[in-house]
Image (cartoon, grey):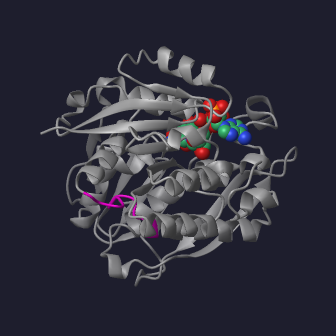
Amino acid sequence: MTHIVRWGIMATGWIAETFTNDLLIDPNVRNASDIAHQVVAVASSSSKDKAEQFISARGITTPCSAYGDYETLVADPNVDVIYVATPHSHHYQNVRLALEAGKNVLCEKAFTVNAAQTKILVEIARKKNLFLMEAVWTRYFPLSIQVRELIQKGEIGEVLRVVADTSFGDDVETKWGTTHRMVNPDLAGGALLDLGIYSLTWVFQTLYHTLPRDQRKPPTVSSQMTPYHLTGADESTTMLLSFPTSTPSNGPHPQQSHGIALTNIRGTQGEIQVLGQPFRPESYRIIPKKGAGEIREVHCPFPGNGKGMYWEADEVARCLRDGKLESEGMPLEESIVIMEVMDEVRKQGGLTYPQQIESTEYPLKF
Ligand SMILES: NC(=O)C1=CN([C@@H]2O[C@H](COP(=O)(O)OP(=O)(O)OC[C@H]3O[C@@H](n4cnc5c(N)ncnc54)[C@H](OP(=O)(O)O)[C@@H]3O)[C@@H](O)[C@H]2O)C=CC1
Ligand SMILES: O=C1OC[C@@H](O)[C@H](O)[C@H]1O
């Protein structure tokens, strides 16, 4: 039987459009006939008109309410789960609004501005028996699942080193100016919270998540930030994470000469190169240790011309169907540890955001 999940979309910006477009793609094109999605409500904090335009632009013809504020959305009894698509500066207030109203939540990355905010949201969700998940879409790609399984099967031996580079190479002033969420400290902008989270995703999903739960230990962190001269947000951030394992310090060497990818996972018996941007990779290459086999490349398509956000939505649907309050693929405990790493990186780099968006006070109007 197909389990249908009714979504409420909070905000009408770029990622809300992209996610909703994916929700509207027939799940059968990706062989997901056990679940289905309906968009039953959309809210814009700017105006009801904007929500109506969002609905008509997507060609949604099934009943779908348009709201001109978030409060009415979270009170809608037809909604099973809210997708929070506001800037990360606002996630804490917006997710909390939804949880306090008794709604399950899928919240865009970065989960919150700091770990203290994430911890409170997790506590509230648990207390109220509500589902909560950070929308780290990449983790739900078949590609990520396959790579994690390969590591767990020992395909490249013990993983010793992971390098993941999520950089755009844009001219920051021309591309992002000073007010865009990418660079605006009032919106918790900067490379770390916006893009660094994807490098951390690869490091964590290969070096941390692949271990049995009781062996997952937080890393130590050493990092460097370069501020963007016009806003003070981080224009670039480099992080070195060390996990407490028995890893020999001399590490592995490239096993067979085959270039380097943006994401490189090196083990004692070979390496996996993940090709394409770390947030939306399209293929991977398994390179066994020299003399131990052939190089294989696996292409992972996006059915129905989707962006790839439908896989995380399918996970939410299955969790709700099965009465799970969190997803195994992105456990809340792991979201907290990752937020703690980002807190530490900001501390080392001297990056703080305005007090009101770092605050755990609720409700706050800003
Ligand atoms: N998973 C992914 O691949 C991606 C994730 N993201 C994440 O999604 C979130 C939103 O990003 P994106 O959609 O690009 O951002 P946009 O600026 O395009 O949209 C954000 C929306 O949030 C609402 N909003 C509420 N308060 C504010 C405020 N003070 N300032 C600006 N907008 C506000 C607005 O919608 P309204 O007026 O309708 O209320 C606005 O349209 C971020 O956390 C980002 O990190 C972004 C891009 C890709
Ligand atoms: O989360 C993201 O992933 C995709 C990028 O294009 C986007 O800028 C970033 O915010």
- Per the picture, the main secondary structure of the magenta-coloured stretch is loop
* Whether residue 253 is visible: no
Q: Could you say where residue 22 lies in the image, as x and y percent from the top left? A: 39, 30
Which quadrant of the figure has residue 222? bottom right
* Residue 338 or residue 276, whichever sits in front: 338
Picture quarter with ligand 1 = top right
Q: Residue furthest right?
A: 230
Quick one: quadrant of the N terminus? top left
Q: Which range is magenta? A: 323-333
Residue at the spot 52% in from the left edge and 59% down from the top edge: 200
**Is-magenta flag for residue 332?**
yes
Check the image and report above or below for 200 versus 83. below
Q: Could you say where residue 257 lies in the image, as x and y percent from the top left? A: 39, 51
Q: Could you say where residue 365 lies in the image, as x and y percent from the top left? A: 75, 50
Q: Residue furthest left?
A: 1
* Whether residue 334 is visible: yes
* Residue 202 or residue 297, whichever sits in front: 202
Check the image and report above or below for 267 versus 170. below
User: Does 132 sit left or right of 121 as displayed?
Assistant: left
Residue at the spot 50% in from the left edge and 66% down from the top edge: 124
Residue at the spot 40% in from the left edge and 84% down from the top edge: 246
Q: How many marks?
A: 0
**Is-magenta flag for residue 242?**
no
Q: Could you say where residue 77 lies in the image, as x and y percent from the top left? A: 41, 41
Residue at the spot 78% in from the left edge and 29% down from the top edge: 174
